[in-house]
């Protein structure tokens, strides 16, 4: 079959791109190749759903500034036949808390956020305590609170984008890409397990944690690795004041969810690989001590569920690789390596990638620095501080 743009991977990222392409160019042929329409192992439905403006790089802050308001109007924007696409967006806020040794770093990031127009608030330890009395602040140097951030339901975001893109004419085919053919600097076909060959003017690698497999098929390596991370659901026996989504220096990251809380402690020490085994000791051994330290009321907590999922971890610098140029290929675009930020940036990155394909340049947010060239130059562009 022939199409204009073939997107390989139909998670939040691929579906968001399909939506933007069809909105910007209604007659464009857009085919999303997604091998598992149930999204059984995909990262999107396993995500925590946090959306925040708290970053150090202007690109990530701008992506959030585009994406979070997009999520706020998502139910109406993505409505199909009058049916709203609810995503349960909760504007509960976000807070980053740091030790005294990281105060200067947090202050620099805060200044960048302020300069880009974010509504963020600097809190000294006594102010943190006043706002969140259950929190232990004895070892903290400061915090930044972002009251307009929050969390949402990742699966609903994915389905909203998918259904809307389909209603605009994008086609999603349940096929598994097992081979890619190249001719010099062009990709000429994606071959599926069924034998179907998809020919396209542009190919987009939106395969998330599996992105490196497509690159291997094309004969080159990419530093994006599957990194297992657990999302735990837990409850607290004691009453705690309403909390925002919190991140602390121990990489503890959690938020309220229903009667309890959802979160975990991601670690970069985890061996890379497609590992979906749940380690039921991890909560007890790693998460609980961090929780009970930060909130003594969590001494009495119960973990009710542990769900493993994969980050598409960019081991080069922890940020997305977007656009053409990988191994000299001009019509093969990377859109992976989000390293834990993909859901919140799906609207912005989908938009940016669509602009690049349709007009050859970024119009809304300049993501040039997130392109392949930084790998060629050996110049990583990591986030500074909590990631
Ligand atoms: C526990 C956990 C918590 C997270 N928390 C957050 C958070 O709070 N906020 C946030 O923004 N992000 C979070 N993330 C990260 C977020 O989930 C990802 O960045 C985002 O979902 C990536 O979307 P995606 O579409 O690229 O990947 P996916 O959703 O994994 O989609 C990729 C799709 O590609 C398909 N595919 C792969 N290879 C092929 C092939 N060869 N042929 C056909 N189809 C193929 C797969 O079936 C899959 O459906 C979290 C992730 C985890 C695991």
Image (tube, grey):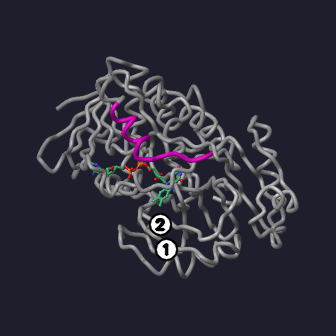
User: Measured along the vertical axis of the image, is residue 42 above or below residue 149?
Assistant: below
Q: Residue at x 43, y 24 (%)?
A: 358
The location of residue 34, given as percent across then percent down, is 27, 45
Is 52 inside the magenta-drawn segment?
A: no
Give the quadrant of residue 2.
Answer: top left
Give the quadrant of residue 219.
Answer: bottom left
**Quadrant in the picture for the C terminus:** bottom right
**Quadrant in the picture for the N terminus:** top left
Circle 2 crowding by C-alpha within 10 Å: few under 14, some 14–19, many from 20:
many
Q: Residue at x 49, y 74 (%)?
A: 270
| First to last magenta residue range | 150-163
User: Measured along the vertical axis of the image, is residue 336 above or below residue 135?
Assistant: above
Q: Residue 229 bears which disc, if any? A: 2
User: Measured along the vertical axis of the image, is residue 194 above or below residue 198?
Assistant: below
Q: Rounded to the nearest whole Å, what is the CA distance between mark 2 and mark 1? A: 8 Å
The location of residue 368, given as percent across then percent down, is 58, 38
Q: Camera-side residue: 167 or 321?
A: 167
Mark 2 C-beta closer than 8 Å to ligand 1: yes
> Would residue 258 be found to the left or right of residue 147 on screen?
left
Q: Camera-side residue: 244 or 8?
A: 244
Q: Camera-side residue: 113 or 184?
A: 113
Q: What secondary structure is marked by label 1?
A: loop
Q: Residue 198 bears which disc, if any? A: none
The answer to whether marks 2 and 1 mark residues whose Cβ atoms lie closer than 8 Å is yes
Give the quadrant of residue 170.
Answer: top left
If you read the primary sequence from the N terminus, does the residue marked by circle 2 or circle 1 appear first? 2
Q: Residue at x 50, y 48 (%)?
A: 342
Is 160 inside the magenta-drawn segment?
A: yes
Q: Residue at x 36, y 29 (%)?
A: 164
Q: Which residue is mark 1?
A: 270
């Amino acid at each position: 079959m022939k199409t204009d743009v073939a997107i390989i991977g139909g998670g939040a990222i691929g579906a968001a791109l399909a939506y933007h392409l069809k909105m910007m160019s209604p007659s464009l042929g857009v085919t999303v190749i997604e091998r598992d329409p149930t999204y059984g192992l995909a990262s999107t439905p396993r995500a925590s759903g946090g959306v925040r403006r708290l970053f150090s790089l202007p690109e990530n802050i701008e992506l959030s500034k585009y994406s979070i308001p997009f999520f706020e109007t998502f139910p109406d924007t993505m409505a199909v036949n009058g049916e709203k696409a609810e995503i349960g967006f909760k504007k509960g806020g976000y807070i980053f808390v740091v030790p005294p040794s990281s105060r200067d770093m947090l202050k620099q990031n805060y200044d960048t956020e302020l300069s880009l127009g974010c509504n963020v608030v600097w809190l000294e330890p006594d102010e943190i305590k006043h706002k969140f009395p259950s929190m232990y602040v004895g070892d903290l140097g400061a915090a930044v609170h972002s009251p307009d951030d929050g969390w949402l339901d990742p699966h609903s975001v994915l389905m909203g984008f998918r259904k809307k893109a389909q209603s605009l004419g994008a086609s999603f085919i349940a096929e598994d890409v097992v081979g890619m053919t190249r001719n010099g600097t062009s990709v000429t076909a994606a071959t599926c397990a069924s034998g179907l060959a998809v020919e396209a003017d542009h190919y987009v690698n939106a395969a998330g944690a599996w992105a490196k497999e497509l690159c291997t098929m094309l004969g080159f390596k990419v530093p994006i690795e599957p990194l297992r991370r657990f999302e735990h659901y837990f409850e607290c026996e004691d009453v705690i004041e309403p909390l925002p989504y919190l991140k602390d220096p121990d990489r503890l990251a959690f938020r309220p969810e229903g009667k309890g809380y959802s979160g975990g402690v991601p670690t970069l020490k985890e061996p890379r690989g497609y590992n979906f085994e749940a380690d039921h000791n991890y909560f007890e051994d790693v998460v609980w001590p961090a929780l009970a330290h930060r909130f003594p009321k969590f001494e009495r907590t119960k973990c009710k569920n542990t769900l493993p999922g994969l980050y598409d971890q960019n081991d080069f610098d922890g940020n997305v690789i977007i656009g053409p140029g990988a191994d000299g290929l001009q019509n093969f675009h990377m859109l992976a390596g989000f390293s834990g930020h993909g859901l919140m940036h799906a609207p912005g990155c989908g938009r940016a990638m669509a602009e690049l394909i349709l007009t050859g340049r970024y119009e809304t947010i300049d993501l040039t620095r997130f392109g392949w060239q930084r790998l060629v130059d050996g110049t990583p562009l990591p986030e500074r501080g909590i990631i």
